[in-house]
Amino acid sequence: MKAAATADPTSRSTASPTAGRQNQLLRTRKDILQAAARLTRQGRNPSLEEIAEEAMVSRATAYRHFPDLSALLVEASFDIATPQADTVFRDAPPKDPAARLDKVDAAFHRMIVENENALRLMLAHTLQRGAGGESDGSLPTRQNRRTPLIEAALEPARGEFKPAGLKMLTKALALVIGTESMVVLKDVLQLNDAQARRVRRWAIRALLEAARKPADH
């Protein structure tokens, strides 16, 4: 049985036509990834046609989002591995954003360590598509898995920040938490895992402090 597509909270009747179109593209991409993940969990090595059927989209639509089947299957594996909020925040202090964000970073760190080779392949594929002109910018080339967890970490303490500051903080934290940060810390700065974790923890706290300051500070 095919799973029904989940509603996306970013879809609003007040959204602009452009934003609405982008949200629809993101939902379609997510549906394709989740369909591939479901079939993979069943022990299958699905074709693009099977994935499109499971996602209830045309083969052409699936191909526009994922012209490379191997890249699709690699990325779908991360939908299985990506930590879920109920697990990440199980023992987290409800109103301590620094501690909750540390939980998010730790969860992504474990996921990255366990899937490093595949994540590097996904990054290489994304960069190759951009360098080769395969993506014209109309279709999303990456799934945003970190922001929902960052937002969930900050939600209990959202009253501590002004709306604009909270929005900027969420985006800045996405630079610190995730695969790209791992590449910089490990490849460029030559840090080991423990050193990289200390740097990210410091950066998270520095960003929280900056977001709490008055705008004219």
Image (cartoon, grey):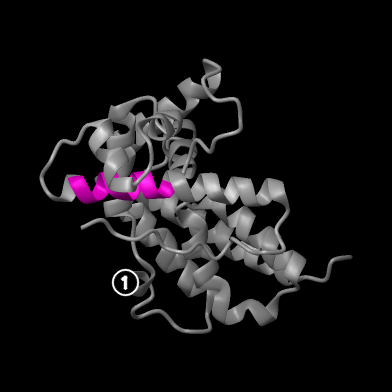
Query: What residue did someone put label 1 on?
Result: 87
Query: Which residue is located at x 26 percent, y 33 percent?
Result: 49
Question: Dominant secondary structure of the magenta stretch?
Answer: helix
The residue that appears at 26% across and 56% down in the rendered structure is: 2
Considering the numbered disc 1 on the image, is that residue within a helix, a strand or a loop? helix
Image label count:
1
Along the horizontal axis of the image, is 151 left or right of 77?
right
Q: Is residue 29 visible?
A: yes
Provide residue 138's location: percent of width, then percent of height. 60, 33
Extreme left residue here? 43
The quadrant the N terminus occupies is: bottom left
Determine the residue positioned at 45% across, 46% down: 28
Tell me where residue 67 appears, x and y as whole percent.
Answer: 39, 25
3 on left or right of 169: left
Whole-percent x, y for residue 191 in the image: 42, 41
State which region is magenta. Answer: 30-39
Q: Nearer the viewer, residue 65 or 117?
A: 65
Residue 116 seen in the figure: no
Q: Quadrant of residue 45?
A: top left
> Percent x, y for residue 192?
36, 43
Above or below 82: residue 119: above
Magenta-colored stretch includes residue 26:
no
Magenta-drawn stretch contains 34: yes
Q: Is residue 43 left or right of residue 63?
A: left
- The amino acid type found where label 1 is placed reads Thr
Note whether 95 is above or below 77 in the view shown.
below
Mark 1, other Cα within 10 Å: few <14 / some 14–19 / many ≥20: few
Find residue 74 and report its image quarter: top left
